[in-house]
Image (spheres, grey):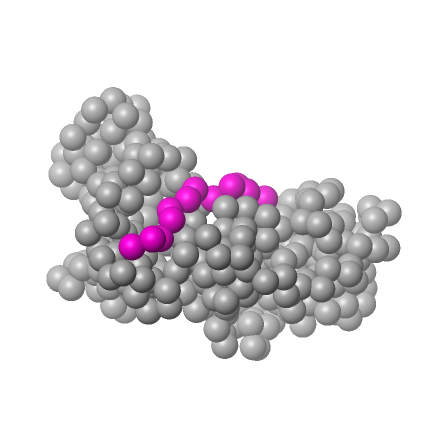
């Protein structure tokens, strides 16, 4: 294990952290030690046609945070958002929030009366998770890390030489859209055979359904509620198709992690997100296949760990990005 240098100036009493997702917008006051205080949330209103209706939920979250006496100790704001994001422009275009395309979220938050121009830092949700796990979680103490979120999609972020590396627009390390199958399915991103089309929760369930697996609970086979959790339950019960679906996903993730390690030399890969509730059903084949893909001497030592911060990672990571900035 290599030790990451401490590069942050943690002088703030609290950071106001905001985590914007397709389902909910969460807020919290995060201490300089990474402890999460006074968490609140509001529904995202993702179906709204008016971008201001969506932003109203963000404003409500900020107002709720500002009602807490500890708000007086806030001297910066960190925002993590579903993407794509553009941290240079301060804009977001979340796939699941159709009213926000190039939405100037940083400028709008800075314009709220409670914020009054406080420094406001934006990052993508996977980059925020990376910052959180490097600060307080499973990537702590490692100088070079890849943190992967496996959910309805696959996102990731990088830590290089002890610092989170978001890239110029905030999208560096976007592992979900590297090609792992040259003849694979077309991806909505415009490419084909993307990792996300193999290893996401949606992809795991779709592959299993296409090969005859059916969930034990009632409902239409294509119902969105039948995701990776149902496939995992079947795999634990010994279903061969379900087991193969997780093996396939683990193999694709292993190929993506090994390719990244070949480019930038990693110490650890940390995996989180809803699909990781499957635990060793995914991690065991991933580790096994990694030995076949990470074969160069400088890639063989990569540790694979489960993320530790769970649903708090978005807020803690948004605060970490603000502190590092």
- Is residue 102 positioned above or below 10 on the image? below
Q: Any magenta on residue 86?
A: no
Is residue 164 among what the camera can see?
Answer: no
- Is residue 205 positioned above or below 104 on the image? above
Q: Which residue is at 41% across, 53% downward?
A: 268
Q: Which residue is at 17% across, 34% downward?
A: 241
Q: Which residue is at 76% across, 48% downward?
A: 64
- Is residue 280 positioned above or below 61 on the image? above
Q: Any magenta on residue 304?
A: yes
Return the x and y of residue 127 as percentages of the image width and height.
50, 60
Question: Which of 59 and 132 lies nearest the eye of the viewer?
Answer: 132
Q: Which residues are magenta?
A: 300-313
Q: Which residue is at 45% across, 61% downward?
A: 144
Return the x and y of residue 271 as percentages of the image width and height.
41, 47
Q: Quadrant of residue 184?
A: bottom left
On the rendered structure, is 52 left or right of 128?
A: right
On the rendered structure, is 189 left or right of 273?
A: left
On the rendered structure, is 236 left or right of 128?
A: left
Question: Which of 173 and 169 lies nearest the eye of the viewer?
Answer: 173
Return the x and y of residue 190 as percentages of the image width and height.
27, 69
Question: Which of 12 and 81 lies nearest the eye of the viewer?
Answer: 12
On the rendered structure, is 267 left or right of 10?
A: left
Question: Which of 89 and 221 lies nearest the eye of the viewer?
Answer: 89
Is residue 276 among what the camera can see?
Answer: yes
Return the x and y of residue 182 as percentages of the image width and height.
15, 64
How many numbered marks, from 0 up? Answer: 0
**Which corner quadrant holds the C terminus?**
bottom right
């Amino acid at each position: 294990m290599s030790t990451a240098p401490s590069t942050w100036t943690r002088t703030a009493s609290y950071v106001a952290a905001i985590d914007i997702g397709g389902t909910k917008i969460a807020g919290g006051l995060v201490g300089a030690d990474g402890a999460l205080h006074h968490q609140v949330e509001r529904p995202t209103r993702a179906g709204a046609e008016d971008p201001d209706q969506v932003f109203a939920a963000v404003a409500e979250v900020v107002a709720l945070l500002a009602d807490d006496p500890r708000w007086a100790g806030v001297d910066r704001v960190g925002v993590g958002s579903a993407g794509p994001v553009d941290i240079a422009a301060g804009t977001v275009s979340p796939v699941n929030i159709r009213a926000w395309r190039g939405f100037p979220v940083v400028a709008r938050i800075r314009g709220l009366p409670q914020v009054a121009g406080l420094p406001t830092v934006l990052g993508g949700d996977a980059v925020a998770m990376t910052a959180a796990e490097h600060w307080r979680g499973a990537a702590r103490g490692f100088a070079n890390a890849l943190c992967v979120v496996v959910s309805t999609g696959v996102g990731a972020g990088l830590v290089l030489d002890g610092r989170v590396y978001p890239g110029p627009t905030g999208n560096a390390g976007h592992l979900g859209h590297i090609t792992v199958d040259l003849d694979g399915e077309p991806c909505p991103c415009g490419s084909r055979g993307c990792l996300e089309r193999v290893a996401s929760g949606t992809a795991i369930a779709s592959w299993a359904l296409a090969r005859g697996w059916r969930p034990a609970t009632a409902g239409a086979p294509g119902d969105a509620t039948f995701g990776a959790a149902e496939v995992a339950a079947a795999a634990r019960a010994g279903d061969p198709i379900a087991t193969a679906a997780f093996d396939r996903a683990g193999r694709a993730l292993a190929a993506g992690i090994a390719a990244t390690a070949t480019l930038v030399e990693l110490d650890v890969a940390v995996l989180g997100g809803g699909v990781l509730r499957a635990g060793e059903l995914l991690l065991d084949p991933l580790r096994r296949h990694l030995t076949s893909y990470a074969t160069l001497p400088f890639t063989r030592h990569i540790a694979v760990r489960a993320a530790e911060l769970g649903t708090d990672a978005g807020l803690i990571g948004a605060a970490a990005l603000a502190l590092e900035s």
